[in-house]
Amino acid sequence: MLKQELTNRMKQLQERLITNEYDAYIITAEEDIWYYTNITYKPEERPFFIIVVPEQTPTLLVPKLEESHVHKSIIDYDIVSYWEFPSSMGSNWYDKLNQLIQGYSRVGIESNVRADVYHLMQAKELVLEQLVEAQRKVKSVYELEKIRMSAKVCDEAMKNIFNTIYRGASVLEPFTLSKKVQTNLIKTKQFDPITTTLLTAVWNAPTSAMPHSILS
């Protein structure tokens, strides 16, 4: 089911490229790359790209360090790797990227690209766009089911906490209960701790009246 979902997402994006008259499209943000590939990673200072072209297999441009890791992708991608600093001329990420897009006249790039990355790109016409953001706003049946599952996990966790908490309990006790929920999701492979941020915590009164507070 996930493979079909990822295939559909990429196909929809490629259709949007045709409609908006783009020869190619570049995706750089970690969460957007995960959206299309299900690959989890932390880019740190090493940029990572998807180059999408209508009716062609997308290309992943990745650091040499991540080359073996990205082969776990669920759908097909061409993989190109680059050497990190200090790299020889022509083997760093911007040389590799510019080589991949040099044959295209009109290239779109998702507008959440880092400024330092954007300024090293060279294309005949490079356009900031929000095609991925627009696509992600419309949830598929698969995504709606995942949202329902997440809500159910939250409901069950809160029910467990309410059934076991008592007046005078320390912050540590409900925190431990909620942390068990996260641990169980990881053990059952329903939660990826690398790509998902999840805070499992309970603040006792009077701090509970301040939802954005952090206990000191």
Image: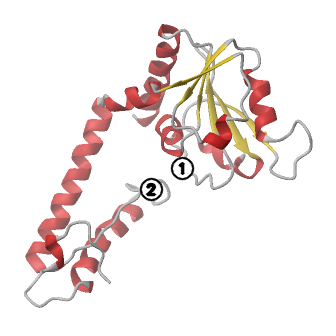
Q: Which residue is mark 1?
A: 40
Checking the image for residue 150, the label placed there is none
Q: Position of residue 165 (x, y in %)?
A: 12, 81
Residue 124 appears left or right of 160:
right
**Comes first in the chain, label 1 or label 2:** 1
The image's colouring method is secondary structure
Q: Amino acid at mark 1?
A: Thr
Residue 71 figure quarter = top right
Asked if 74 appears above or below 189 in the picture, the reply is: above
Identify the residue shown where x is 30% and y is 68%.
200
In which quadrant of the rendered image does the N terminus lie? top left
Q: Quadrant of the C terminus?
A: bottom left
Q: x, y percentage for residue 3?
A: 47, 33
Q: Say how many tags the image has.
A: 2
> What's the mark number on residue 192?
2
Q: Residue at x 20, y 66 (%)?
A: 157
Estimate the x, y position of residue 158 in percent, counting from the top left: 15, 66
Q: In the structure shown, which secondary structural element does the residue marked by tag 1 occupy?
A: loop
Question: Which residue corresponds to the image point at 67% horizontal and 54% vertical from the top-left?
Answer: 45
**Residue 107 to residue 164: above or below:** above
- Give how far apart the Cα atoms at labels 1 and 2 are: 8 Å
- Height in image: 173 above or below 163? below
Q: Is residue 100 left or right of residue 164?
A: right
Residue 32 located left or right of residue 55: left
Residue 80 image position (x, y, % from top left): 75, 35
Mark 1 surroundings: few (<14), some (14-19) or many (≥20) residues within 10 A: many
Q: Nearer the viewer, residue 199 or 191?
A: 199
Determine contact: label 1, label 2, CB under 8 Å: yes
Instruction: Give the residue type at disc 2.
Output: Asp
